[in-house]
Amino acid sequence: MKRDGPGGPGGTGGGSPPCAVEAGGSPPCAGKVGGGPEAQSKHGLVIVDKPGGMTSHDVVARVRRLAGTRRVGHAGTLDPMATGVLVVGVEKATRLLGYLTLTEKEYAATIRLGQSTSTDDAEGEITGGAPATHVCSETLARAITELTGDISQVPPAVSAIKVDGQRAYRLTRAGAAPELKARPVTVYEFTVTGTRQVKGAGPGGPGGPGGRGGGSPPCAGKVGGARKRAGEHWAW
């Protein structure tokens, strides 16, 4: 977790240099944390490097305890599997969160081709697959082109999107997976930074949507890991 001046739950505010703290740990720099009038008067944004396994709500709950206030929110949900930037607002800074969700975001992900799951990521049950040995660099490049620019993307059934007042992932886990409609999104850049061969599959590498994107993937795929590296004008 990175805290900058008055935005963090501890520290001296003002022009103090930022200090870092893990999502569940104690701040390594001077400052007061916990309840009390002084802690409750803090306002600002906290930039958290969310670890895998924690929900965004888990992070908010910990910041509430550190800041001594329940008026805490975040600027966009990260799946428990995902790691990286999670922007948290404390007290009056929560008013900014609605604006921060509208800005560009950057992710680094690993995609495995040749295998599909019920959740489009590594945490779901394997539902099928297709040989990926035929996927060459040219085929991959064509698929990436189809997934770049203004596209329509179907959110996964385990997303945090609300359907009739309930989160889609809760409905899905209860056995009533909703049919989500495609949404317009803009992918400004989709870059493959590397590929490697794994047993029983063709080349797969970091980059973008492994499940249901805007184009037709050459074979089944899933996201094996994802890290949000930048968003809301902050980056790691």
Image: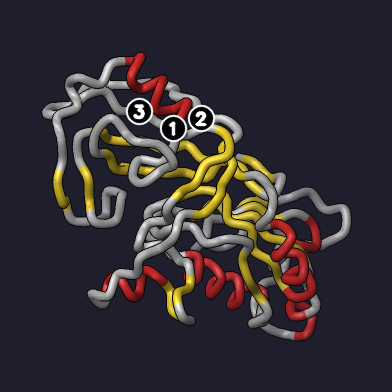
Query: How much space separates mark 2 and mark 1, taking CA atoms?
Result: 6 Å
Residue 115 percent across, percent down from the top left: 20, 40
Based on the displayed image, in which of its 4 quarters is residue 99 positioned? Answer: bottom right
Residue 51 percent across, percent down from the top left: 45, 53
Residue linked to disc 3 = 205
Based on the displayed image, in which of its 4 quarters is residue 89 positioned? Answer: bottom right
Q: Tell me if mark 2 has few (under 14), some (14-19) or many (20+) residues whose alpha carbon lies within 10 angstroms of its own.
A: some
Rendered image: mark on residue 59:
none
Residue linked to disc 2 = 190
Q: Does residue 84 appear left or right of residue 90 in this picture?
A: left
Residue 184 percent across, percent down from the top left: 55, 50
Residue type at the position of mark 2 = Phe
What residue lies at 18% left-to-right and 56% top-to-bottom? 125
Query: How much space separates mark 2 and mark 3, taking CA atoms?
Result: 12 Å
Query: How much space separates mark 3 and mark 1, taking CA atoms?
Result: 6 Å
What residue lies at 48% left-to-right and 81% top-to-bottom? 165
Q: Does residue 208 appear left or right of residue 31 in this picture?
A: left
> Nearer the observer, disc 2 or disc 3?
2
Residue linked to disc 1 = 207
